[in-house]
Image: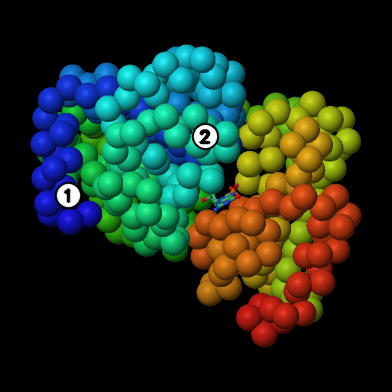
Amino acid sequence: MKKEELNHLKDTLSSPQHILIIPHKNPDGDAMGSCLGLMRALEKRGHEAFVLAPNDYPEFLKWLPGTEKVMVYEQDRNRAAEEIKKASLVFTLDFNSLGRIGDLSQELENYEGDYVMIDHHQQPDDYARFTYSDPNMSSTCEMVYDFLEKMELSSEIDEQTATCLYTGIMTDTGSFRFPSTTSRTHRVIADLIDRGARNDQIHGAVFDSNSLDKLHLLGCALKNLVTLEEYHTAYISLSQEELDQHNFKKGDTEGFVNYGLSLTGIKFAVIFIENKQEGIIKISFRSKGDFSVNDFARSHFNGGGHINAAGGRSELNLEKTIEKFRDLLPRYKNELQP
Ligand code: 5GP
Ligand code: MN
């Protein structure tokens, strides 16, 4: 963000605004943590702020401070439309293209004010008046921390905001182990702990809240794991029937794709998850090293993300999607060598 833009935004935020904060569809820990952390800090500074999620988010995030104030567009379109009418500023967090919020983007056509984008994905679109985009950042939560500093709002980071931001940094960095984790990330984390974030409790709330159904579903996913050693690739598939058998709930498959990457010699791991209701296969891609799953997802599966973590979708059935995926691999054989 340029200096004039920064000053303009600071100026806007110096008087009370009615602010909407929007995460991407199927919000994860970084999306919800950044939205709720920012909401809290803005509220403390005297703004009216609301989080409007395009659709519901997983139970393992529903303890985050401020959760009770989250509106879910799919569940309450009328109220969302009212809030959009009142909004004087809209923040979009953890995504960079309005295509990532589903139908909510149509509702926003009635909104004529400014957008602020804070995001760490590659190739941002150009819809925001204020764009703070940095693909080198570990997480949107780390960027919100910086943003609050730039806006001279750091003093508003209390225990609740610190807890939200800690959560998103933790989930997006795979608990501080991905290459995007820098010494600066750890400095931010240290400050968040000083401000009241409880690392043990946050980790427990997110990772030790499994249901037996979820662990059985993980067992099923691991049984379905296939390796293609020639391409240093592993993939998992889960059909709607398998999900139903295990009483699937949103968030239950979070992290499953990483098991493929934990195999010796595997550089590229994928999970295909059937969603009969939406008529799509949701795909998650993960890689190690310089194989860009962002490029792969963008080129072939209508998606995107980061170099080592991306998502996409397919409108073919599960079998045909996997066939398409397997047929693409020979083109990438060289890139997939260790
Ligand atoms: P996940 O596989 O956990 O859903 O997502 C991995 C990363 O890719 C996240 O940063 C997420 O925001 C991004 N991502 C997931 N699905 C999509 C998609 O359909 N389109 C784009 N552009 N990014 C996605
Ligand atoms: Mn993120």
Q: Assign the N terminus to one quadrant of the image.
A: bottom left
Q: Which residue is mark 1?
A: 5
Judging depth in this view, the residue of 335 and 123 nearest the camera is 123
Numbered marks: total: 2
Residue at 59% x, 18% y is 75
Q: Secondary structure at mark 2?
A: helix
Relative to 165, is 257 above or below?
A: below
Locate residue 172 relative to residue 246 in the image: left or right. Answer: left
Q: Residue at x 27, y 27 (%)?
A: 88
Badge 1, how many Cα within 10 Å: few under 14, some, many 20+? Answer: few
Q: Residues within 10 Å of mark 2 (few under 14, many from 20)?
A: few
Q: Nearer the viewer, mark 1 or mark 2?
A: 2
Colour mode of the rendering: rainbow
Image coordinates for residue 92, horizontal then vertical, percent: 39, 39
Tell me: residue 136, above or below residue 331.
above
Q: Secondary structure at mark 1?
A: helix
Instruction: Please give the label number shown on residue 106.
Output: 2
Is residue 204 shown to the viewer in this render?
no
Residue 59 position, x and y percent, is 59, 25
Query: In the visual, does 2 lie left or right of 24?
Result: left
Q: What amino acid is labelled 2 in the image? A: Gln
Q: Report the amino acid beneath label 1.
A: Glu
What distance separates the C-alpha of mark 1 from that of mark 2?
27 Å
x%, y% of residue 5?
17, 49
- Write the residue at 45% across / 60% down: 122
